[in-house]
C-alpha cells in the first residue's frame, strides 16, 4: 500500500482530475492582465548621423539589435523590452562618430536625440588659457569643451574611403597583438625631421575612449633620446580634450592643428594623458601618462607600446592609433583606436619601415568589411539581433493540464531559449535561429513544443534544421507533427515550426517521470537543441514580428491540446472545442485567451533564465513578490523573478 501511494504522488494528475485549490485562485487579478514580463515599445532615434551603423543593447549591455540610421539619421522600430528595465543602450559603430553607450530611457519614451555637428558653438564659448604652472607649453587657448582656438581655418576632408580604411585597419575590439602584431614590430615609433623648416600638421579623426583624454607632443634631439619622462623639457598640448562633439567634447573629424616648423635633427613624439581634461585644464592624471617612446612607459615588454604608426599611401598621410589604458590592466582592449589622428608634413617624413594601413576586405562580396561581418564567408549572415540579448537566455514555463487547472508550480516544462535574428548586409532577415535548453520536466504527460510565426506564411520558409546535442535523440519519432519538406507543420494558416514532439525523448527521466524538479532525485544536465529557419526571401525586421513570437506546448501527445502564452491565439490545428471547457475561460472573439476563470495562465515567459519552484510548490511559494505583481496588473514588483533580498523562499525553489 505504501508503494502504491508513493507511485501516485510521483505522477501529475490525470486529465480532468483537478489538484487542490491554491491561494492563487483567491486573488483579484485584472482581467486584461496577461502576465507579461515585457511589453512592446517603439524605439525612436533622431540624429544627424546619416546611414550610420549602430547596435542596441539591453540594460546588461548585451546586444539585442544591429541596424543603421536612414538617410536622415533616423530609425524607428518596435521592440519587446522587459517591464522591469528602465533603459536600453545605443552605441554607434562608425569611425568619426561618438562611441559612447548612450542610455535610452523608458521615462523619455525610449526616444533618443543626438546632434554631433558643432556649428558655431565654439566661437560663442568662453576662452580658456593654459595654466603655465602645469609644466606644459600651449599653442593657444580653448573653450570649455576643450576645442582649441588655433584650429586650422579649413578642416581636412576625411573621405569615405579613408574612414573605411581606418575601420578596417583599427577595428573596435580587435586586439592589435592578436590580429595585427606587425603594427607593433615596426622599428619606427616617432618622426625624425631630416630637413630644416619642416612643417607638421596633425588632424583629429576619431576617438572611442571612455575618458576625456589629453593629447600632446614633445621634441628632442634625434641623436639623444630621453631615457625618462623627466628629461622631456618641451611637452606641448595639442588637444586638451580629445573627445568628439556629443561624446564629452567638441572635436569633429577633420579638425586640424599645425604643430609648428622644425629643423633637421629634431624628433617628434606624442603623449596621451588618460582622463587628462578636468573641464578647464589638462591635468596630471592618476592613470599616468603614456608616450610613443616605449622606454618612457611603465609597463614591461611586450606591453610598453601605446601608439602605432601606419602609412596610408592612398591619402599620403600617417595614421596614429593610441591605447589609453595601462596595457597590463585587465580592462585594456589593445585595439589602439581610443584615439586616431593623422600626420602630414612638408616635406614628407620618411615612410621606410612604417607598416601600411589595410585595404577593404570582403570575402563574400556583400559590401561589408570582414572585420564587421559576422560571417565573412556567407553573404546571408552579416548582422545578428538577439532575444533576450547576446549571451543571455529567456525562459518559458508551462502547466500542461489545460483546459483544466494545474498545480501552478509552472515546471511541467521549463525551457531556456535564445533567438538569433540573422540579417544580410541590407539589414534584411535571412534566418531565424535559436537555442532551446530543456531545463526541467515536471510532467506525467509527454509534451511537445513548437513555435508559431503569425507574421509569416507557409511560403515564407525555405528550410528548417533542428540539431540536437546527441544525434541519437529522437526529436520527431511519434508522428505528432505532420511536417512539410521545408520543416513547417502542414495545415497551418501561418508558419508553425515544430521543435520536438516529446521532451522525455530528449531528456529521459530517472525512473520514468520528472526531470530536475525533485531535489531528492538525481540531477540531469539540461539538453540543448538548435534550430535554423531560412526564409525564402529576406524580409525587413518589421515584417517578421517580435520575439518571442508565439511559442506553445502540445500536451499529452494530443495535437489539439495547444497551450500558448495568455493573450496569444491558437493555431489552425488546435481543438477549439476545448476552449471554455474545464477551467478555461477564453473568449475566442476577444482578447482573453488561455486564461482560467480565475484569470490565471498556463504559461509564462520570463526575460531571464528562470529559477523555477520544486515539484508541487506553486510559484508564489518560491517567488514571494509574484502575488503583488499579479494583483497590481503588473505595475508592482515588475522584477519579481529576480534573486533580490526578500524576493524568494529558497527552500521552495529547485
Image (tube, grey):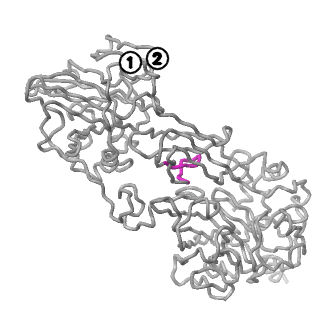
Q: Secondary structure at mark 1?
A: loop
> Which span is picked out in magenta?
54-64
Residue 263 coordinates in the image, percent (x, y) = 10, 22
Q: Is residue 200 above or below residue 131?
A: below
**Horizontal side, residue 393 vs residue 306: left or right:** right
- Separation of residues labelled 2 and 1 (CA atoms): 11 Å
Answer whether residue 627 is visible to the viewer in this image. Answer: yes
Residue 295 belongs to the span the image colors magenta: no
Q: Answer few, some or many: residues within 10 Å of disc 1's Cα (few below 14, many 20 plus, some between 14 and 19).
A: many
Relative to residue 348, is residue 236 depicted above or below? Answer: above
Q: Which residue is mark 2?
A: 124
Secondary structure at numbered mark 2: helix
Residue placed most toward the observer, 134 or 158: 158
Where on the picture, by quarter, is residue 580? bottom right
Residue at the location (57% across, 70% down)? 525
Question: Is residue 532 visible to the viewer in this orientation of the structure?
Answer: no
The answer to whether residue 398 is left or right of residue 253 is: right
Residue under the image location 46 percent in, 29 percent down: 248
Question: Of the numbered discs in the image, which one, if any, rests on residue 142?
Answer: 1
Q: Which residue is pictured at 68% across the width and 38% down the height?
A: 107
Q: Is residue 453 left or right of residue 94?
A: right
Nearer the observer, disc 2 or disc 1? 2
Res. 496 image quadrant: bottom right
Circle 2 packing at 10 Å, graded few (<14), some (14-19), many (20+), is few
| In front of the other: 417 or 301 | 417
Residue 124 spot, x, y in % from top left = 46, 17
Q: Position of residue 163 (x, y in %)?
A: 34, 45
Which of 540/408 is in front? Answer: 540
Amino acid at each position: 500500500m505504501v508503494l502504491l501511494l508513493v507511485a501516485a504522488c510521483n505522477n501529475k494528475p490525470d486529465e480532468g482530475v483537478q489538484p487542490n485549490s491554491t491561494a492563487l485562485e483567491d486573488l483579484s487579478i485584472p482581467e486584461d492582465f496577461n502576465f507579461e514580463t515585457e511589453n512592446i515599445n517603439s524605439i525612436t532615434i533622431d540624429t544627424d548621423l546619416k546611414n550610420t551603423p549602430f547596435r542596441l543593447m539591453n540594460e546588461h549591455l548585451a546586444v539585442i539589435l544591429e541596424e543603421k540610421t536612414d538617410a536622415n539619421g533616423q530609425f524607428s522600430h518596435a521592440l519587446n523590452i522587459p517591464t522591469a528595465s528602465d533603459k536600453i543602450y545605443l552605441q554607434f559603430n562608425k569611425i568619426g562618430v561618438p562611441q559612447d553607450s548612450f542610455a535610452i530611457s523608458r521615462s523619455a519614451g525610449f526616444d533618443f536625440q543626438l546632434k554631433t555637428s558643432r556649428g558655431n558653438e565654439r566661437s560663442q564659448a568662453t576662452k580658456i588659457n593654459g595654466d603655465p604652472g602645469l609644466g606644459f607649453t600651449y599653442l593657444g587657448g580653448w573653450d570649455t569643451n576643450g576645442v582649441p582656438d588655433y584650429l586650422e581655418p579649413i578642416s581636412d576632408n576625411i573621405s569615405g574611403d579613408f574612414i573605411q580604411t581606418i575601420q578596417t585597419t583599427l577595428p573596435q575590439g580587435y586586439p592589435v597583438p592578436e590580429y595585427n602584431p606587425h603594427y607593433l614590430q615596426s622599428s619606427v615609433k616617432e618622426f625624425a625631421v631630416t630637413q630644416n623648416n619642416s612643417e607638421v600638421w596633425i588632424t583629429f579623426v576619431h576617438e572611442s575612449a571612455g575618458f576625456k583624454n589629453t593629447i600632446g607632443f614633445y621634441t628632442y634631439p634625434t641623436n639623444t633620446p630621453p631615457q625618462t619622462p623627466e628629461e622631456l623639457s618641451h611637452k606641448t598640448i595639442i588637444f586638451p580634450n580629445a573627445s568628439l562633439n556629443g561624446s564629452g567634447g567638441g572635436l569633429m573629424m577633420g579638425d586640424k592643428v599645425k604643430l609648428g616648423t622644425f629643423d633637421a635633427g629634431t624628433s617628434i613624439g606624442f603623449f596621451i594623458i588618460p582622463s587628462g581634461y578636468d573641464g578647464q585644464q589638462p591635468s596630471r592624471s592618476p592613470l599616468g601618462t603614456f608616450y610613443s617612446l616605449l622606454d618612457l612607459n611603465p609597463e614591461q615588454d611586450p606591453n610598453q607600446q601605446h601608439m602605432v604608426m601606419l602609412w596610408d599611401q592612398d591619402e599620403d598621410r600617417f595614421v596614429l592609433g593610441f591605447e589609453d589604458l595601462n596595457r597590463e590592466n585587465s580592462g585594456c582592449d589593445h585595439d589602439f583606436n581610443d584615439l586616431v589622428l593623422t600626420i602630414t608634413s612638408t616635406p614628407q617624413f620618411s615612410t621606410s619601415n612604417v607598416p601600411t594601413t589595410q585595404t577593404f576586405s570582403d570575402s563574400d562580396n556583400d559590401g561589408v568589411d570582414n572585420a564587421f561581418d559576422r560571417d565573412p564567408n556567407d553573404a546571408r549572415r552579416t548582422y545578428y539581433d538577439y532575444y533576450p540579448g547576446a549571451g543571455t537566455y529567456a525562459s518559458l514555463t508551462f502547466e500542461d493540464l489545460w483546459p483544466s487547472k494545474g498545480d501552478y508550480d509552472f515546471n511541467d516544462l521549463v525551457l531556456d531559449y535564445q533567438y538569433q535574428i540573422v540579417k544580410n548586409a541590407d539589414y534584411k532577415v535571412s534566418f531565424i535561429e535559436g537555442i532551446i535548453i530543456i531545463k526541467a520536466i515536471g510532467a506525467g504527460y509527454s509534451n511537445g513544443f513548437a513555435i508559431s510565426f503569425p507574421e509569416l506564411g507557409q511560403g515564407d520558409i525555405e528550410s528548417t534544421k533542428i540539431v540536437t546535442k546527441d544525434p541519437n535523440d529522437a526529436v520527431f519519432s511519434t508522428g505528432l507533427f505532420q511536417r512539410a519538406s521545408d520543416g513547417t507543420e502542414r495545415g497551418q494558416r501561418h508558419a508553425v515550426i515544430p521543435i520536438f514532439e516529446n521532451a522525455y525523448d530528449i531528456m529521459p527521466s530517472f525512473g520514468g517521470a520528472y526531470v530536475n524538479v525533485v531535489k531528492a532525485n538525481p540531477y540531469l544536465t539540461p539538453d540543448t537543441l538548435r534550430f535554423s529557419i531560412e526564409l525564402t526571401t529576406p524580409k525587413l525586421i518589421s515584417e517578421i514580428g517580435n520575439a518571442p513570437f508565439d511559442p506553445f506546448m502540445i500536451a499529452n501527445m494530443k495535437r489539439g491540446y495547444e497551450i500558448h502564452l495568455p493573450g496569444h491565439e491558437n493555431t489552425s490545428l488546435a481543438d477549439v472545442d476545448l476552449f471554455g471547457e474545464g477551467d478555461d475561460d477564453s473568449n475566442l472573439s476577444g482578447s482573453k485567451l488561455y486564461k482560467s476563470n480565475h484569470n490565471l495562465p498556463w504559461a509564462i515567459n520570463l526575460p531571464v533564465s528562470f529559477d523555477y519552484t520544486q515539484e508541487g510548490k506553486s510559484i508564489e511559494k518560491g517567488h514571494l513578490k509574484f502575488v503583488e505583481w499579479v494583483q497590481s496588473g503588473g505595475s508592482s514588483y515588475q522584477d519579481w523573478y529576480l534573486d533580490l533580498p526578500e524576493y524568494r523562499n529558497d527552500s521552495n525553489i529547485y
